[in-house]
Image (cartoon, helix red, strand yellow):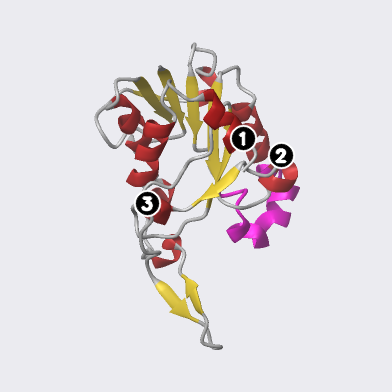
Amino acid sequence: MKILVACEFSGIVRDAFAKRGHDAWSCDLLDTERPGQHIKGDVLDVLDDGWDMMIAHPPCQHLCVSGARWWAEKQADGRQQAAIDFFITLMEADIPKIAAENPPGILTKAYRPPDQYIQPYWFGDEAQKKTGLWLKNLPKLVPTNVVGRGKMWVQKNGRKRGAAWTMCLPPGPDRWKIRSRTFEGIAEAMAEQWDEKIDQNKLNESRII
């Protein structure tokens, strides 16, 4: 398949599909961090280039609930609506199979709820980062290797809560880059489960789970 990985500079998802023989390309305004097929530029300029599948990682800084205290400001100056419109444009692209990811946030109300939420620890990475997947003609991801949830913290009442992976990152100029990279286990699951030989019965079953 000819696969576009939109808004990805890390090359992690691109390489997972490329290893399986697909013609996979990442696209981002930044250079790729790994050698590989990469388009540096605006992904909107290449949406009509005959892709069979697109996996999109649109920026979440104006959409995610963790930044809700700034939503009023971002709604007033148009940043949030622009981010919503960009997400919807990707989802409505004329590409047969599409997956777009984003953390919990305004999209559930502004667009629609995701088809599923996933966690890195379902796929072999001991970390928590709740991520929504919006799917078009693709099945929900099935956990492949459930491991520990990573760091935990204890509330005053004694209850243990999982510490989101992003909370464990040190401050620094590259923190946003680290936060935006897809976990290797999730990328491998996407490449394995969203191969061209998707069982239509499994796809139909996944829609009702």
Report if residue 29 is visible in the image.
Answer: no
Identify residue for label 3.
178
Report if residue 209 is visible in the image.
Answer: yes
Q: Name the mark nearer the viewer: 2 or 1.
A: 2
Q: Residues within 10 Å of mark 3 (few under 14, many from 20)?
A: few
Indicate left or right for 35 with 55 as reference: left
The range drawn in magenta is 61-80
Find the distance from the CA under tag 2 to the CA under tag 1.
9 Å
Q: Residue furthest toward the bottom?
A: 157
Q: Name the mark nearer the viewer: 2 or 3.
A: 2
- Magenta span main SS: helix
Q: Amino acid at mark 1?
A: Phe
Identify residue for label 2.
111
Q: Which mark is residue 87?
A: 1
Find the distance from the CA under tag 1 to the CA under tag 3.
21 Å
| Secondary element at image label 1 | helix
Towards the viewer: 183 or 209: 209
- Label 2 vs 1, first from the N-terminus: 1
